[in-house]
Image (cartoon, grey):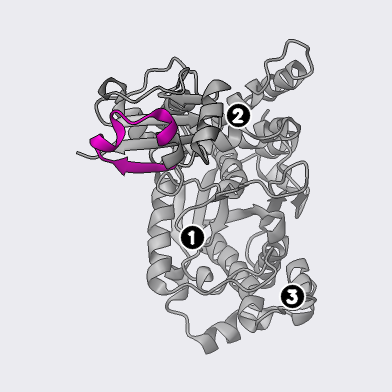
Amino acid sequence: MKNVIECLQERGFIEQMTSPELVEHTKQPRNVYLGFDPTADSLHLGNLVAIIALEWFRRFGHQPVVILGGATARIGDPGGKSQERPLLDDSQIEHNLRSIRHFFEHIFYGPGLMPVVLNNNDWYRDWRLIDFLRDVGKTFRISQMLAKESVKMRLGSEEGLSFTEFSYQILQGYDFAYLNQHRQVTIQMGGSDQWGNITAGIEYNRKIGQSAVYGLTFPLLTRSDGKKFGKSEEGAVWLSEEKLSAYHFYQYLVRVPDADVIKLLRMLTFLPMNEIRAIESDMQKSDYVPNSAQKRLAEEVTRFVHLEHGLQTALKVTDGMAPGSDAQLDAQTLQLLMRDMPHEEMSRSDVVDCKAVDLLVRVNLASSKSEAVRLIKNGGAYLNNVRIEDPAFAISSRDLIDGAYLLLSAGKKKRFLVHIAK
């Protein structure tokens, strides 16, 4: 496939384009940008569609430009929000900027142009309010600004829309013009909730007589039930290793429903479409191994976000977490597990010679001794992934992994890690 737009269309990325001429425009290398406001110190799984789209442009020979909104994060984009975002102080924004910039330093690798990462506060810090209103604000028309879908939605809500948020599209529109003039950027991408902001920038470029620019949006990442991807019971599925381990990230993707896995393979991986179609066909066969498509998805996406060493760590911890698994448990694996499961530090005397039923109760894997006994008799209690057969079983020093850990399990999902204090 010779054109990045055709590639993205086939994979279900493109929801809207500002002009069909974009296909012809992208037959030559172009500078294309995406913006991210640093409202947290990590991006999340929902942002990954945008990052993958930018990587596709990079693989087709285009120059990716990433804008971190050090200025616009102080305003807050009303798009997709039912109420105004809480304002962040400067120190928090600077911390978030550093964290996200660090993420972009490793997410793109391999052949191709590395992204240019910029902070839009660099071109706003010297503007004076009156000058900005006179030179930029005068070109925007209230009627057009009110017609934007994100604005109309908020105006009709109980929360309403502040003037601060209303001005956001002017700032994003100016960003596009600045990047076109100083960085030769001709394409802006964003989620579907960014359509109004993107078209505002294109109109502003036209009014000030700059070269033609284009925009495209991709659909927000949603599940088959209409809910957004990227949320778990524990909260957002972060892309940063500091906020969410590679193991937890991998596990979220392994558990996606069959109804969603093919869409995610198209949009979140770089697998060829013929391979994805083969996986989809295999899922309909009687000998299909359940969850194998999800495992392929989880492996590909975890490798992209957390690199090969992150994937291998996730796979190692996954093996170590499976009750009944013959995977070799060691202190290194269990230290990694400690981030992702309930755990407690206990003294050696609290553990050695303690009956398993008592320890199961103490760590809340059973509500009472009688429940713990039933759990053991029913084959649902495990110590270090080995089934406990005898309700009278007591822990010995030989059971301590590297003299320092015990892994207790009740069924396949409830686990608890005991760390022996030195």
Q: Secondary structure at mark 2?
A: helix
Cα separation, mark 2 vs mark 3, equals 40 Å
Residue 341 among those drawn in magenta: yes
Identified at 46% across, 67% down, the residue is 70
State the image coordinates of residue 55 (x, y, percent, origin top left). Answer: 55, 40
Q: Nearer the viewer, residue 167 or 185?
A: 167
State the image coordinates of residue 62 (x, y, percent, origin top left). Answer: 55, 42
User: Label 3, on which residue?
Assistant: 145
Cα separation, mark 1 vs mark 2, equals 26 Å
**Left or right: 199 as drawn, with respect to 338:** right
Magenta highlight range: 339-358
Q: Which mark is residue 297?
A: 2
Q: Which mark is residue 247?
A: none
Q: Is residue 25 above or below residue 96?
A: above
Q: Which residue is situated farthest in the top direction here?
A: 287
What amino acid type should be assigned to the residue bearing mark 1? Ala
Residue 235 among those drawn in magenta: no
**Left or right: 285 as drawn, with respect to 214:** right
Quadrant (top left/top right/bottom left/bottom right) for the N terminus? top right
